[in-house]
Image: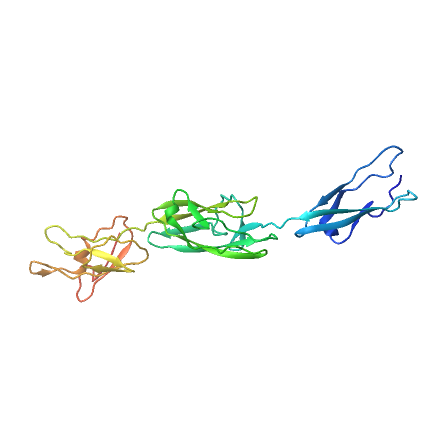
Amino acid sequence: LTLTGTPDKVAVSGTHAADFTVSVQPGSPVATNAYTTFKVVFAPGGAGLRTAELSIDNDDIDENPYNFTIQGTGRATPEMDVWGHGLEIGDGDSAQSAADGTDFGTLTLGNSITNTFVITNSGSASLTLTGTPDRVAVSGTHAADFAVSVQPGSPVEANAGTTFNVVFSPGGTGLRTANLSIDNSDSDENPYNFAIQGKGHLWGKLTAWDGAASNFFGYSVSVDGDVALVGATHDAIGGGRFRIYFRAQRRGHERMGASDQIDRLGCRDRRFFRLFGRGGRGRGGGRRRRR
């Protein structure tokens, strides 16, 4: 028996021919009292009944071509994916990256940053996010440092998407980690999990304190934005440049200049700073550099 079809010995036609593929074509010729096999793969492109016809051209005089109908039923299913900054975040992803938003970067304590993520449904049925009370749940070592400020919508229709926002507010210094979990109706990605992280940073403190018997300052200093104010008590957290303003003091009958008073300003990390005097000249001409 010779199978004469070209280019395929078994051809597929019919209403949903694209849903059926001959993955292995039969051999030819087929010897007397022998056989050959072929394989057909069904991958439904839609829901409901899907039909096609197979046709095999051959040299059998009364069964050429040899035809028969095949069918299958497609079941609509959702297919969930999560994206950050346009990059896919796979289910179970533990490789945090700034590129996809799963690494929130380094943040000064007291501040926060928000990253937006997108849930898409590339399947053929609605995707339901089933988590309660929150559709996106946060867990892990530093879960308290991460909050879902905007929860995603549900259901997510086929070929549609929804977004959610995560806020990172570090509660301590160093690496802060957590996990996001999204319960859903995708049969092979439920729950959809991935890891997130960020780092907390604490800037150095700028502090002025009272001297000993001479009491040079008489006031404590705190930072408000980038300006240090005399007459308040506060442990400053911040960065950048600071300006310290203080009142000149008298030591007996001698008025203390700014340069004299800076001697009482401690600098634990010994960074460079400048002193600018005004309304009088202290040692060094009213300006002094010190490490």
In the rendered structure, the answer to whether residue 278 lies left or right of residue 104 reads: left
Position above or below: 281 against 75: below
52 lies left or right of 107: right
Number of marks present in the image shown? 0
**Quick one: which residue is furthest to the top in this view?**
33
Question: Residue drawn at (79%, 42%), measured in percent from left and top?
Answer: 25
Judge by depth and name the residue closer to the eye, 220 or 276: 220
- Residue at the right extreme, as displayed: 61
- The colour scheme of the drawn protein is rainbow
Image coordinates for residue 11, horizontal then vertical, percent: 80, 48
- Residue in the foreground of this view, choosing between 24 and 20: 20
Q: Viewer-proximal residue, 172 or 286?
A: 172
Q: Residue at x 23, y 53 (%)?
A: 207
* Residue reaching furthest to the left: 253
x then y, percent, for residue 107: 38, 52
The quadrant of the rendering that contains the N terminus is top right
Q: Is residue 282 above or below residue 205?
A: below
x and y percent of residue 121 in the render? Answer: 57, 53
In the current view of this chain or complex, which residue is farthest to the bottom? Answer: 279
Provide residue 126's location: percent of width, then percent of height: 57, 53
Name the side, left or right, on which 5 lies relative to 218: right
Q: Residue at x 70, y 50 (%)?
A: 49
